[in-house]
């Protein structure tokens, strides 16, 4: 996708320091972190969102979770991290290239997640 910002990052058109880079995935720091550690894990393949992923993407989706766990350990948050994806505009997705937010590193109070607040 020519006008996709994450495709540009994947292709090296926007200089970005990668925390991970292999044949299927890249990971890099979020430009607007919401936690002390906030890394985006992004497949090199342009898939719009989790809701648009297909059966053929299952291996890729599994790999994202493995790399998330490895990156969490590398960043010193292996025992306490969150991995989340927003699927669709109505869920707050703003970049329409599949990505997972790996967040953690809180020192004191762990922020509630929205779902908890609604209980
Ligand atoms: P989402 O709302 O789940 O689509 O998340 C998109 C995320 O991408 C946001 O947290 C943004 O801060 C982040 N983001 C957008 N552009 C960049 C960029 N050039 N480099 C790093 N993070 C970015
Ligand atoms: Zn893309």
Image: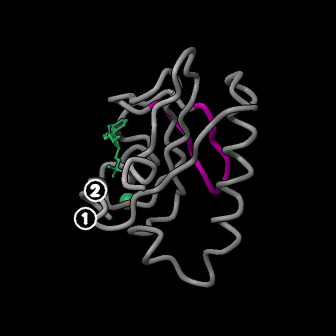
Q: Secondary structure of the magenta portion, mostly?
A: strand
- Vertical order, 68 against 73 (above or below): below
- Vertical order, 33 against 8 (above or below): above
Q: Is mark 2 within 8 Å of ligand 1?
A: yes
* Separation of residues labelled 1 and 2 (CA atoms): 5 Å
Provide the residue designation for mark 1.
89
Q: Quadrant of the N terminus?
A: bottom left
At a point 50% along the width and 27% down the height, the residue shown is 17
Measured from the top left, where is residue 110 in percent x and y?
A: 52, 28
Number of the label disc, if any, that sits on residue 98 = none
Q: Is mark 1 within 8 Å of ligand 1?
A: no
* Quadrant of res 71: top right
Q: For the residue labelled by badge 2, is the local secondary structure a helix, a strand or a loop?
A: loop
Measured from the top left, where is residue 55 in percent x and y?
A: 62, 84
> What residue span does the magenta drawing correspond to?
19-29
Provide the residue designation for mark 2.
92
| Residue at the far bottom in the pictured view | 55
In magenta stretch: residue 70 = no
At a point 70% along the width and 46% down the height, the residue shown is 67
Measured from the top left, where is residue 53 in percent x and y?
A: 50, 76
Q: Is residue 24 left or right of residue 36?
A: right
């Amino acid at each position: 996708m020519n006008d996709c910002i994450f495709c540009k990052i994947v292709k090296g058109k926007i200089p970005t320091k990668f925390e991970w880079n292999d044949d299927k995935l890249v990971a890099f720091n979020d430009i607007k972190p919401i936690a002390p550690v906030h890394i985006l894990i992004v497949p090199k393949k342009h898939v719009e969102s989790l809701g648009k992923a297909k059966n053929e993407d299952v291996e890729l989706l599994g790999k994202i979770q493995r790399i998330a766990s490895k990156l969490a350990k590398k960043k010193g948050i292996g025992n306490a991290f969150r991995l989340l994806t927003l699927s669709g505009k109505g869920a707050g997705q703003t970049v329409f290239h599949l990505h997972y937010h790996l967040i953690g590193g809180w020192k004191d109070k762990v922020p509630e997640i929205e779902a908890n607040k609604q209980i």
